[in-house]
Amino acid sequence: MFSWQHFVWLGICAAIIITMIVLYRKQRPSLNKVLNYCLIICFLSEFTKVFSVMEMASSADGSIIFPYIPMNHLPLHLCSIQILFILYVRFSENKKMRDHLLCFMYPSCLLGALAALAMPSIFSTTITVDQAFTHPMAYQFFIFHAMLIILGLIIAMSGEINWKWRHYFDCLIIIAAMGFISLYVNSIFASPTYLNGVLQHVDFWPNFFFTYNNPLGIKVTTIQGWYLYLVILAAVIIVLVFLCFYPLIRAGKKR
C-alpha cells in the first residue's frame, strides 16, 4: 500500500474512470447496455481470479492432491458479491426489487471499490508489490474495482431512480443485514483449533465485509474493542452513505 506501483495503478484507474464517464455522458447508453459490459468484465475477472489463485493441496496423509481456492477469494466480499446483483438487475423484471438493489449498488459499488483501491489488500494476501504489473491478479483487482466505481456513478447519473430518503434508509438496512450475515459466514469459513472441546485459537478467517477486523491492520484484542470497532464502522458507513445520497435527493427535490 502507498508504494509507487500502487500510485501508478491509482492513476491508471482514474484515467479509465474519467474516460468511461465522459464517454457515457456523450453517448448515454441505456443502463442495461452498461450492465452487459459490466457482466463481461465480471466474467473475465472471476475467470482470471480462479485460475490465478488455484493451488494444488494434498490431504493430511499425502495420498490425494486436489485443486483448492483459498477461502478469502470466494466472491463474498462487498465488491465481489456485486456480481450477483449485476446479474439480477440486468435480467430481473421485478422493478421494485431491481430499484432497491440499484439504490444499494450505487453507494456500495462506489464506496466499496474506492476503499479497495485506496487499501489494496491484494498486496498483502495474494501477490507482492513487485508483481504489481506482472501478475494477472493485479489487473483483475484494479480493473474490476474501477469498473464498480464507473457502474456506481452511472447508476446515479442514469435517471432510472427517483431518489428519495427512503432509498437511503433501505440501503442502510441492506448493509446492516449483510454485515450481520457476514458474522456467520466468517465463522463458517474460519479454521478453529479445539482441544478437548475447548477453542484454543483460530488459524484463519476470511473477514468478509471487514466485520471481524479492520482493513488498517489495527489489532482488536478484546470483545469490548470489537464492539467499539463495529460502532465506528457503522458510524462511518452511515455518514459516507449519507454523503452519497444527499446530493441526489436534493437535486431530485429541485427538479
Image (cartoon, rainbow, N blue to C red):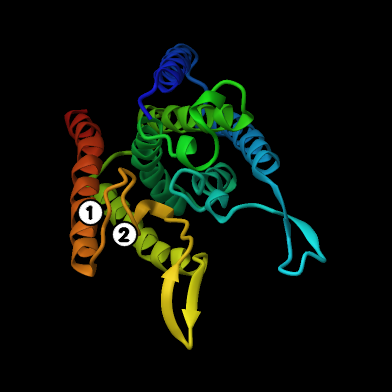
Pinpoint residue 115: horizontal percent, then vertical percent: 35, 36
Amino acid found under the numbered disc labelled 2: Ala
Which disc, if any, is residue 176? Answer: 2
Pinpoint residue 130: horizontal percent, then vertical percent: 53, 24
Q: Which of the two residues, 15 or 173, is positioned nearer the viewer here?
A: 15
Callout in the foreground (1, 2): 1
Instruction: Give above or below for 133 relative to 103.
Output: above
- Looking at the rendered structure, the secondary structure element under dot 2 is helix
Label 1 crowd bin: few (<14), some (14–19), many (20+), radius 10 Å = some
Pinpoint residue 88: horizontal percent, then vertical percent: 55, 49
Residue 234 shown left or right of residue 128 in the figure: left
Q: Which of the two residues, 242 or 16, is positioned nearer the viewer here?
A: 16
Residue 68 shown left or right of residue 71 in the figure: right
Amino acid found under the numbered disc labelled 1: Ala
Q: Is residue 93 visible?
A: no
**Residue of label 1:** 234
